Image (cartoon, rainbow, N blue to C red):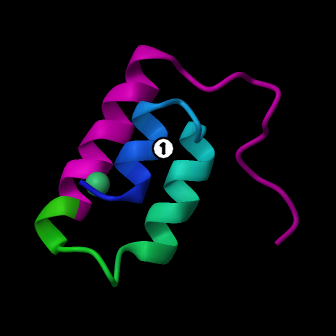
Amino acid sequence: MCLICIDFDRQAMSLGEARRALGEMRVALDAAHVAEVEAKLAESERAAPSPPSSPPSGPA
Ligand SMILES: [Zn+2]
């Protein structure tokens, strides 16, 4: 359990925010837990697909 899990479970953090946070925190987290969080986010994404209002590609 980490800050990402807590905030995401409380819905205080959106899927996109959680993914960003995971990218920033993954070096500080246990590798096994990173996999758990990725699985949690993937499952959530499958249950509620992201709205088409956010294009996947854009200027870097
Ligand atoms: Zn966690």
Cβ of mark 1 under 8 Å from ligand 1: the answer is no
Q: Residue at x 47, y 31 (%)?
A: 10
Question: Percent from the top left, x then y, of residue 40?
Answer: 29, 38
Residue type, label 1: Asp
Q: Residue furthest top?
A: 47
Residue placed under numbered mark 1 in the picture: 7
Q: Residue furthest bottom?
A: 27
Q: Is residue 48 magenta?
A: yes
Q: Give the magenta part as a residue range.
A: 34-60
Q: For numbered disc 1, what is the local secondary structure? A: helix
Question: Percent from the top left, x then y, of residue 49?
Answer: 54, 21
User: In screen coordinates, is 20 left or right of 33?
Assistant: right
Q: Residue at x 78, y 40 (%)?
A: 55
Front-lying residue, 10 or 34: 10
Q: Residue at x 61, y 50 (%)?
A: 17
Front-lying residue, 52 or 43: 43
The quarter of the image holding the C terminus is bottom right
Q: Is residue 54 magenta?
A: yes
Total labels: the figure holds: 1
Res 13 quadrant in image? top right
In the rendered image of this protein, does residue 7 appear above or below residue 27? above
Q: Residue furthest right?
A: 59
Question: Percent from the top left, x then y, of residue 34?
Answer: 25, 63
Neighbor class of circle 1 (other Cα within 10 Å; few <14, some 14-19, many 20+) is some
Q: Residue at x 70, y 45 (%)?
A: 56
Res 50 quadrant in image? top right
User: In screen coordinates, is 48 left or right of 43?
Assistant: right
